[in-house]
C-alpha cells in the first residue's frame, strides 16, 4: 500500500527555513514528508500560485488536496509531527496551539525577511507582482 505523501514547500535558499525543514519530522503513521524547494518549477508550486498564495510570505504544507499556508502550515506540521527528539518536542509544544502559531509565525517571518535582505537573496515572486523581486 502506498503511503500518503505530505509536501512541505519552502524557500531552500533561506538558511533559517532550510534548517527548520531539515529538522522537522512527522509521525510515520501519518505518511512521508517530502521537502519541496519553492524555487524549483513544480506542479505543487503551480497549484500554490493558482490559489493566490505568495510563497515569499509563508511556507505551504500540502496534505491530500488541502493546502495549509503560513501559520496554518506550521500549526498543522506540529500536530502531525514526531516527538522523537528535543527539537521536534519543542516545535510541537510551541506550535500545537493555533493561537501561538498565529502569534509567533509573523515574528519568525519578519526575522526571515530581514535575514534574506541581509543575504541579498531575491524573492521567488511566484505571483509575478511587478517590482517585487527584493526583500
Image (cartoon, helix red, strand yellow):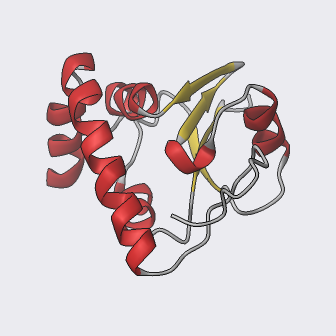
The residue that appears at 37% across and 66% down in the rendered structure is 19
Q: Position of residue 102 (x, y in %)?
A: 28, 25
Looking at the image, which residue sits at the far front? 131
The residue that appears at 83% across and 40% down in the rendered structure is 46
Residue 9 higher or lower than 101, as above or below: below
Question: Horizontally, is 63 left or right of 51 in the view?
Answer: left
Q: For this rendering, which residue is in front, 1 or 90?
A: 90
Residue 51 higher or lower than 126, as above or below: above
Q: Position of residue 1 (x, y in %)?
A: 74, 28
Question: Horizontally, is 86 left or right of 69 in the view?
Answer: left
Q: Position of residue 8 (x, y in %)?
A: 57, 44
The residue that appears at 36% across and 70% down in the rendered structure is 115
Question: Horizontally, is 92 left or right of 52 in the view?
Answer: left
Residue 75 higher or lower than 82, as above or below: above
Q: For this rendering, which residue is in front, 4 or 44?
A: 44
Number of residue marks = 0
Q: For this rendering, which residue is in front, 126 or 8?
A: 126
Identify the image quadrant of residue 119.
bottom left
Mark yes or no: residue 44 visible. yes
The residue that appears at 66% across and 63% down in the rendered structure is 133
Mark yes or no: residue 15 visible. no
Q: Position of residue 48 (x, y in %)?
A: 73, 35
Residue 29 higher or lower than 133, as above or below: above
Identify the image quadrant of residue 2.
top right
Amino acid at each position: 500500500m502506498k503511503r500518503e505523501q505530505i509536501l512541505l514547500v519552502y524557500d531552500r535558499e533561506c538558511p533559517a527555513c532550510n534548517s527548520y525543514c531539515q529538522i522537522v519530522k512527522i509521525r510515520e503513521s501519518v505518511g512521508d514528508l517530502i521537502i519541496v524547494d519553492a524555487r524549483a518549477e513544480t506542479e505543487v508550486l503551480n497549484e500554490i500560485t493558482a490559489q493566490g498564495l505568495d510563497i515569499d510570505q509563508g511556507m505551504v504544507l500540502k496534505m491530500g488536496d488541502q493546502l495549509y499556508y503560513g501559520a496554518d502550515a506550521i500549526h498543522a506540521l506540529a500536530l502531525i509531527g514526531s516527538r522523537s527528539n528535543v527539537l521536534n518536542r519543542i516545535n510541537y509544544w510551541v506550535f500545537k496551539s493555533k493561537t501561538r502559531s498565529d502569534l509567533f509565525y509573523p515574528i519568525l517571518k519578519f526575522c526571515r525577511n530581514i535575514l534574506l535582505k541581509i543575504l541579498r537573496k531575491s524573492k521567488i515572486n511566484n505571483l509575478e507582482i511587478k517590482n517585487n523581486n527584493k526583500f
